[in-house]
Image: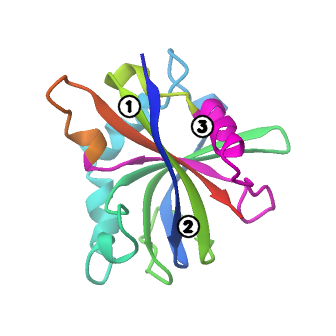
Amino acid sequence: MAEITKVYRQSVGAMRFIGKKYGDSDRGSCGTFGPQWHEWFEKSWFDVIEKQVPGSLKDTCEDFDAAIGLMRCKNGEFEYWIGYFTPANTTVPEGFAHIDFPKSNLGVCWVYGEENSVFFKEGECGERLTKEGFEILTDDIHDWCFERYSCRYSTPDEKGNVILDICFYVK
């Protein structure tokens, strides 16, 4: 069973998200985007983006040397993007799209548990952030949340558990 073990505010500079967009029709048989994630690793698409970044992805912001699952529901359409946050104005490789984000604040939740238990917790994280006094932004620029797959996720602890960051743009 997963639990939210940490909630905090993180300030981030202007960033460019580079990736590929998916929608509801792209979901796999279990309702996830697992096949798309496998494709990203098989085709080394993360490497393609990293080659465009001057310096390191970590230069963008602490914890941003991580794969991102960016999502929102707008006008009844669900969008799910896979990619990286990069420094603003990073060149977008052919075959990829981008979204530019201004300097902002994030409300970050650490969801801790067995790998299969940490997904689909955006609702719980949004409620927890609100309960702790964060105001989640819903304007056209900030109406996104995202999963951040940092080293806390890719390196299980001694119990085999991971931490998935779930982030919302907050005031």
Left or right: residue 79 compared with residue 150: right
Q: Quadrant of the C terminus?
A: bottom right
The foreground one among 57 and 89 is 57
Task: Choose mark 2 or mark 1, whichever is in front.
Answer: 1
Q: Residue 52 colored magenta? A: no
Instruction: Residue lying at the far left in this picture: please name it.
Output: 158
- Quadrant location of residue 64? bottom left
The residue depicted at 19 percent of the width and 40 percent of the height is 155
Instruction: Identify the element where label 1 is drawn.
Output: strand
The residue depicted at 71 percent of the width and 44 percent of the height is 130
Q: Kindly report the distance in space between the C-alpha atoms of the residues bearing marks 3 and 2.
A: 26 Å
Instruction: Identify the element where label 3 is drawn.
Output: helix
Q: Amino acid at mark 2?
A: His
Residue 125, label in figure = 3
Q: Amino acid at mark 3?
A: Cys
* Residue that mark 1 sits on: 112
Q: Would you call the spot at circle 2 few (<14 residues within 10 Å), some (14-19), or many (20 or more)?
A: many
* Residue that mark 2 sits on: 98
The residue depicted at 19 percent of the width and 23 percent of the height is 159
Mark 3 vs 2, N-terminal side: 2
The foreground one among 141 and 135 is 135
Query: Where are the magenta residues, as a range?
Result: 122-151
Q: Amino acid at mark 1?
A: Tyr
Q: Quadrant of the N terminus?
A: top left
Where residue 69 sits in the image (x, y, percent)? Answer: 49, 46
The residue depicted at 77 percent of the width and 40 percent of the height is 77
Instruction: Identify the element where label 2 is drawn.
Output: strand
57 relative to 73, above or below: below
Q: Kindly report the distance in space between the C-alpha atoms of the residues bearing marks 2 and 1.
A: 30 Å
Where residue 151 sits in the image (x, y, percent)? Answer: 25, 49
Q: Would you call the spot at circle 3 few (<14 residues within 10 Å), some (14-19), or many (20 or more)?
A: many
Q: Residue 149 colored magenta? A: yes
